[in-house]
Image (cartoon, rainbow, N blue to C red):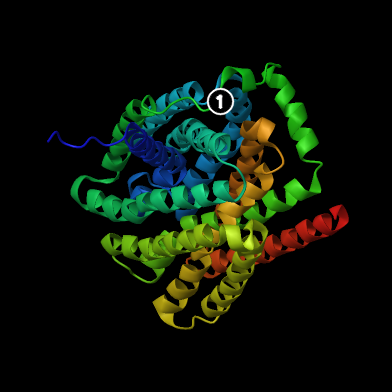
Amino acid sequence: MPEARIPDATVLSRRKGMQQWHILVVLSVLMGFASISTDFYLPAMPEMARSLSASAGQVALTVSGYLAGFSLGQLFWGPVGDRYGRRLPIAVGLAMFTCGSAGCALSSTITTMIIWRVVQAVGACASVVLARAMVRDLYHGARATQMLSTLMTIMAIAPLIAPLLGGQILQLSGWRAIFWILVVVGILTSLALFSVPETLSPEKRHTDRISNAFLRYGALLRQPRLLGYAGSGGCFYAGMFAYISGSPFAYITYHHVPETRYGLLFGASIIGIMLTNQINARLAHRLGSDCLLKLGCVGAMLAAIMLMVTSWLDLGGLWGLAIPLFFYVSMAGFIIANSLVGALHDHSGQAGTVSALVGAVHYGSGIAGSALVGFFADGTPVPMSCIIAITSIAGFLFLILIRKVKSTLQ
């Protein structure tokens, strides 16, 4: 008897599923460029300070400079993506990222390093802001929350592995080799981009001038509900980047953790993010994104207050620092995706612009967090811990704003 054939519908369904997973992986890589660009060189920051004859505060400005370019660049790429589609602007951004990474590898002073980090960031943010817009093009409501959580779980692998690899590369080849590897990452991602279809059809694109987008930003900023979502996420980003800027010196310099083991402590927090992202994806339909956002903000605030107390009183040594930080960072799984979905929910027609504005608020807040750590650096974890606690409380207050607006609308 002839071999039974699989029905055509089943074959098409399987192919469609494989294509969706392929798109999901590429989008997760694009969204992961922010963390890849920073987490990879975190273990090298003390060595960079010695090599470039810079202070700890000056090296922390390489994070702040990156965030400045990343934050402001999104305001440009979002409207461009709404007008010209998603893939072409991402390709241009990846080219900028690759050039910026090469410039960082060749830098001989801390000033040139900061400048090239800005270039690197402006390119990388095109991938992040437009990948989020692509998710909004493809999915809606609770499904969008689930997909963003899944994407963040996949892309969390990068910051989990990056510090570990960065520490090993630092030992084998020095800190410059880390940035040369980022050059290779940029090239490979550019090639992978062309296997992903365009998600914004020509008839859905904005036809007005790019300059008009800044007028739309002004109108969006007058919407309290949008500000509530953006602000709660932005305060968390401020604390996160205070952690990213301050933790290498808190762990390696203050607590004498070997550079090769720093990645293990950093990676433990990323595992926490992956777990909460999966919980968030499973509970999105049942509890709703607003409830999960509140859960994350309350959890982050309690962990941050505990962190401030243990750091101020020097309780528990290394573990008194690492355990509260683990719980604080883990709340990213509840806060980031839900604040984005909440902000994008009522603005499907301009997902790129809204994604850019929210991203600019998030990373602009991150600039403040990392810069404050550099400014108040005193050789102890206390400044980092206090900044994380203050921003967590502020994030909770933005939730109250969202609740008030919702009760008014009902």
Q: Position of residue 20 (x, y in %)?
A: 41, 38
The answer to whether residue 228 is visible is yes
Quadrant the C terminus occupies: bottom right
The residue carrying pointer 1 sits among few (fewer than 14), some (14 to 19) or many (20 or more) residues within 10 Å by Cα, namely some
- In-front residue for pair 405/279: 279
Where residue 100 sits, quadrant-wise, is: top left
Does 191 sit above or below residue 150?
above
- In-front residue for pair 316/230: 230
Does 211 sit above or below residue 269?
above
Q: Position of residue 175 (x, y in %)?
A: 29, 45
Q: Position of residue 347 (x, y in %)?
A: 70, 37
The residue that appears at 82% across and 55% down in the rendered structure is 405
The residue that appears at 45% across and 54% down in the rendered structure is 56
Where residue 33 sits, quadrant-wise, is: top left
Describe residue 307's horizontal placement relative to residue 266 as left or right. Answer: right
Does 48 sit above or below residue 356?
below
Quadrant the N terminus occupies: top left
The residue that appears at 51% across and 57% down in the rendered structure is 281
Toward the front, the furthest residue is 1
Toward the left, the furthest residue is 1
- In-front residue for pair 237/88: 88
Q: Secondary structure at mark 1?
A: loop
